[in-house]
Amino acid sequence: MNSSTARKRRSESSALAPFTQEQIADLDIKGPRPLVVSDADEVLVRFAEPLERFLSERDLYLDIVDYRLVGNIRRQSDHSPVDQDTVFGLIDDFFEKRVDHLPLVDGAVEALESLARHADVVILTNVPNAYRDRRIQAFQSLGLNFPVVANSGLKGGAVRVLADLAAGPVAFVDDIDRHIADVATTVPDSYRIHFVADPRLAAVCERAPHSHHRSDCWRRTSEAIEKFLEGATG
Ligand SMILES: [Mg+2]
């Protein structure tokens, strides 16, 4: 889950935003080399738990009945859902106040460091470009020392451009099924992992149909990616 869950009705397209193109052009990716592209929220860092704390401070709560925010953020007083615009405002405010303080998902640093020994690793996150520098600093403070690309809309376009630069096998990790489906379209031979860190969220969503592997564990995810890369590179 991430801010794009709330923003999807505002902007959802595979077209690459200029700021995303510029960030990718600045990366030092020279293939042929394997590439691992990972989402951040609910994959590398926790999102739902910190959001719940943020909501409880505002007499609200997240009703985890399915994988979306609109309709599931409710008032503690009468359990009524807040409207869509209020959800968008809350998520923007949450990012503004908490983006620097989202805790790591267990094993994420170790897994990405291990994969980075023989693959380029890129964090592809749907946050407004203005938050990118704060995210980079926050991730570095957590030990996630990898390039961060801010994206808007679906992720298939960005992963296609990254895949062309790497010119090697591509693994993609995300918690949102529509990003996985989009990457399946733009990079069909990619290896796609549907990763949901929060067990309550994992319980309310099916494995993404276009994923090869469903996981909530970075050790097993890393092993699965290694196995794919070994097979793909011979
Ligand atoms: Mg996410």
Image (cartoon, rainbow, N blue to C red):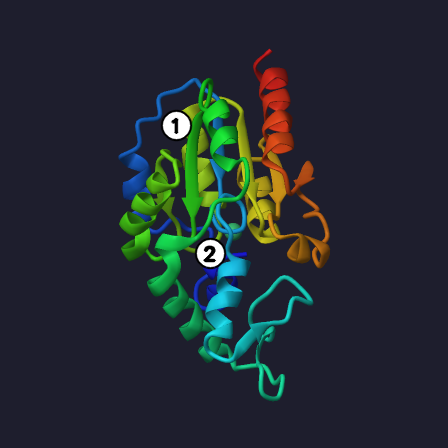
In the current view of this chain or complex, which residue is farthest to the bottom? 78
Disc assigned to residue 13? 2
Please, what secondary structure does the residue beneath circle 2 have? loop
Q: Residue at x 38, y 60 (%)?
A: 98
Residue 105 sits above or below residue 91 on the image: above
- The location of residue 172, given as percent across then percent down, is 54, 37
CA–CA distance in space, label 1 to label 2: 21 Å
For the image, the number of numbered tags is: 2
Please, what secondary structure does the residue beneath circle 1 have? helix
- The location of residue 40, given as percent across then percent down, is 47, 46
Chain-order first, disc 1 or disc 2: 2
Q: Which residue is tagged 1?
A: 165
Residue 103 appears left or right of 192: left
- Label 2 is placed on what type of residue? Ser
Residue 10 sits above or below residue 209 on the image: below
Residue 96 appears left or right of 44: left
- The location of residue 57, given as percent across then percent down, is 46, 74
Q: Residue at x 34, y 49 (%)?
A: 135
Q: Residue at x 51, y 52 (%)?
A: 46
Residue 150 appears left or right of 61: left
Residue 18 visible in the picture: no
